Image: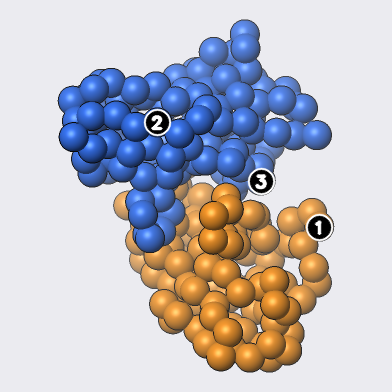
Amino acid sequence: EIVMTQSPATLSVSPGERATLSCRASQSVSSNLAWYQQKPGQAPRLLIYGASTRATGIPARFSGSGSGTEFTLTISSLQSEDFAVYYCQQYNNWAALTFGGGTKVEIK
Amino acid sequence: EVQLVQSGAEVKKPGESLKISCKGSGYSFTSYWIGWVRQMPGKGLEWMGIIYPGDSDTRYSPSFQGQVTISADKSISTAYLQWSSLKASDTAMYYCARGAFGQLWFDYWGQGTLVTVSS
């Protein structure tokens, strides 16, 4: 099973600042990496797939990068609605998809 | 409009059986994978398994193999997640989600079904 490790567990950021979230895979997943946002009481929402392609309707302030084992989600200028938990997910191995443990982005 | 609508919250006792559902609409149900994801209280997302309703090809996470059964009825565009004998540790929110066409990132999610198992 491919283990996805996200860091940090919690990120404290002021509105308007940049947030950088990391996701590391225990083995290469090529670019088969997605990012999701989850707000309290809501289902997750797809943000990024293919490591760097924004999903439909996702603002340009969200960007993804990386390949292989190291990935980054960047939120260029945090808005109030961006405070949430973010998860990465690898889909390189269709027999065993895995999510990272999540990064909570909170207001500083 | 693509929608996944899940069945309502359940309260069960340990040892009871349960089947929850996820009805897809607004797209060709047989052409997209449906996945199930568990979220225990205050915890992260865990992939449980996936099914391709077109041919019922099903794959399970090693962590959930033998613990749950995933099925689908393509005639009514509905996927299912079932337990034969619930445990208190099955208490969680369960989400279904649609895999993007030919891929396994999840582009649409159901609203979730809360399952509470308590004596």
What chain letter is assigned to the residue under label 2? B
Give whichever of A104, A73 is nearer the camera: A104
The chain painted blue is B
Secondary structure of the residue carrying numbered label 3: strand
> x and y percent of residue A108 in the render?
56, 90
Q: What kind of residue is marked 3? A: Asp
| Residue shown at the point (39%, 69%) measured from the top left | A5
- Crowding around mark 1 (Cα neighbors within 10 Å: few <14, some 14 to 19, many 20+) is few
Q: Chain of mark 1?
A: A
The hue of chain A in the figure is orange
Residue B18 in view: yes
Query: The disc labelled 2 sits on which kind of residue?
Result: Glu
For the residue carrying disc 3, how many other residues have a C-alpha within 10 Å: few (<14), some (14-19), or many (20+)?
A: many
> Would residue B99 be visible to someone looking at this image?
no
Residue highlighted by disc 1: A57
Question: Marks 2 and 1, how far apart in space?
Answer: 33 Å
Q: Which residue is mark 2?
A: B10
User: Which callout, 2 or 1, points to the residue nearer the camera?
Assistant: 2
Asked if marks 3 and 1 fall on the same chain, the answer is: no
Sequence-first disc among 3 and 2: 2
For label 2, the crowd category at 10 Å Cα-Cα, with few meaning under 14, some 14 to 19 and many 20 or more, is some
Q: Residue at x 56, y 31 (%)?
A: B6
Question: Which tag is nearer the camera, tag 3 or tag 2?
Answer: 2
Quarter placement of the N terminus of chain B: top right
